[in-house]
Image (tube, rainbow, N blue to C red):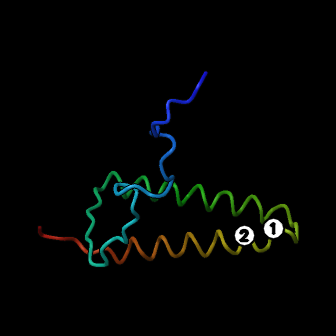
Amino acid sequence: MAHSGTKRHRDRDRGLRSFDAVEAPAVDRMFRMTEAQRELVAEYLRYIDEARRALERQHNPDNREIVRELRASADRIYDLLNELQETDA
């Protein structure tokens, strides 16, 4: 089958299209969190803590870094949640 010579859609440049452009999020964005969402986050933090404790019980030296990161991550999430301010908007 011969090529017609016309440029096909798939022959165009494969670069980013205008709607694919990555934009940095605004720094001063505000989020609201419902009590139900806050409870879900607390539940997920409990899962992280359970996983950390399970790894600690294994007494495997290879898990030390993972345990340390799990603890630090859970602490940072907990601190961020506590710092959230209620908005009147």
Residue 16 location (% of width, % of height): 45, 58
Q: Nearer the viewer, residue 28 or 47?
A: 28
Residue 40 location (% of width, % of height): 43, 52
Q: Is residue 89 left or right of residue 18?
A: left
| Real-space CA distance between mark 2 and mark 1, rounded to the nearest whole angstrom | 6 Å
Residue 49 location (% of width, % of height): 62, 62
Q: Is residue 64 left or right of residue 38?
A: right
The image's mark for residue 67 is 2
Other residues around mark 1 within 10 Å, as few (<14) / some (14–19) / many (≥20): some
Residue at x 61%, y 60% (from the top left corner) = 48
The extreme top residue here reads 1
Other residues around mark 2 within 10 Å, as few (<14) / some (14–19) / many (≥20): some
Under mark 1, the amino acid is Asn
Residue at x 11%, y 67% (from the top left corner) = 89
Q: Nearer the viewer, residue 6 or 48?
A: 6
The extreme left residue here reads 89
Q: Is residue 35 above or below residue 78?
A: above
For residue 31, which quarter of the picture? bottom left
Q: Is residue 6 left or right of residue 75?
A: left
Q: Nearer the viewer, residue 71 or 18?
A: 18
**Quarter of the image where the N terminus is located:** top right
Q: Nearer the viewer, residue 79 or 32?
A: 32
Numbered marks: total: 2
Residue at x 65%, y 57% (from the top left corner) = 50
Secondary structure of the residue carrying tag 1 is helix
Under mark 2, the amino acid is Val
Residue that numbered label 1 is attached to: 63
> Contact (CB < 8 A) between labels 2 and 1?
yes
Secondary structure of the residue carrying tag 2 is helix
